[in-house]
Amino acid sequence: MLTEADATRTDGFITVMLFGQLPTRCDEIEELGHYPGDGIRSARIFLREGRKPGLENMYCTQGLGKIWSINRVILDNFSTTVEIFINNYLVRKIRVIEALGHGWYNMH
């Protein structure tokens, strides 16, 4: 289950940060691919959530599984949104925040 998603663009690169929690300890999440937008469609990230290999037919007690995070960088100058798909279903569409890549930060 996706719980939080953020996307920022700096110098033509979109950084996408995804956070979520698995339904049981027998489940896992993996990224299948990420793609830039093409001027018509948004940038996209495809994830698969399901049972770990070898545990597909085993009973797992319902309870919360591990918290997960995925961070990806997509080369994309134009997309204003990122679509997030889990198991081929669109679960969230997030707006890309423009970040300025100029200046000095955290310099002491």
Image (cartoon, rainbow, N blue to C red):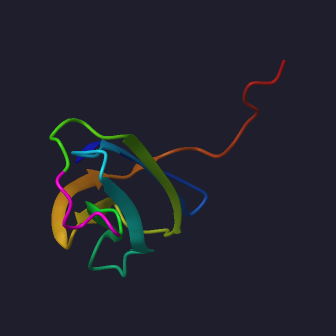
Query: Number of callouts in the render?
Result: 0
Q: Residue 22 at what x, y percent from top left? A: 28, 46
Q: Is residue 24 left or right of residue 18?
A: left
Residue 21's quadrant in the figure? top left
Q: Is residue 88 left or right of residue 74?
A: left
Magenta span contains residue 22:
no
Q: Is residue 72 above or below residue 65?
A: below
Residue situated furthest top in the rendering: 108
Question: Which one is in front, 60 or 18?
Answer: 60
* Image quadrant containing the C terminus: top right
Q: What secondary structure predominates along the stretch shown in magenta?
A: loop
Residue situated furthest right in the rendering: 108
Magenta span contains residue 56:
yes
Q: Is residue 97 above or below residue 48?
A: above
Question: Which one is in front, 94 or 1?
Answer: 1
Q: Residue at x 20, y 73 (%)?
A: 88
Residue situated furthest front in the rendering: 58
Give the magenta-colored segment's residue range.
54-59
Question: Which one is in front, 93 or 90?
Answer: 90
Residue 87's quadrant in the figure? bottom left
Q: Residue 28 at what x, y percent from top left? A: 35, 57
Q: Residue at x 52, y 44 (%)?
A: 99
Q: Residue 17 at what x, y percent from top left? A: 44, 48
Q: Is residue 23 above or below residue 9?
A: above
Q: Residue 48 at what x, y percent from top left? A: 30, 67
Q: Residue at x 21, y 60 (%)?
A: 58
Q: Residue at x 19, y 66 (%)?
A: 57
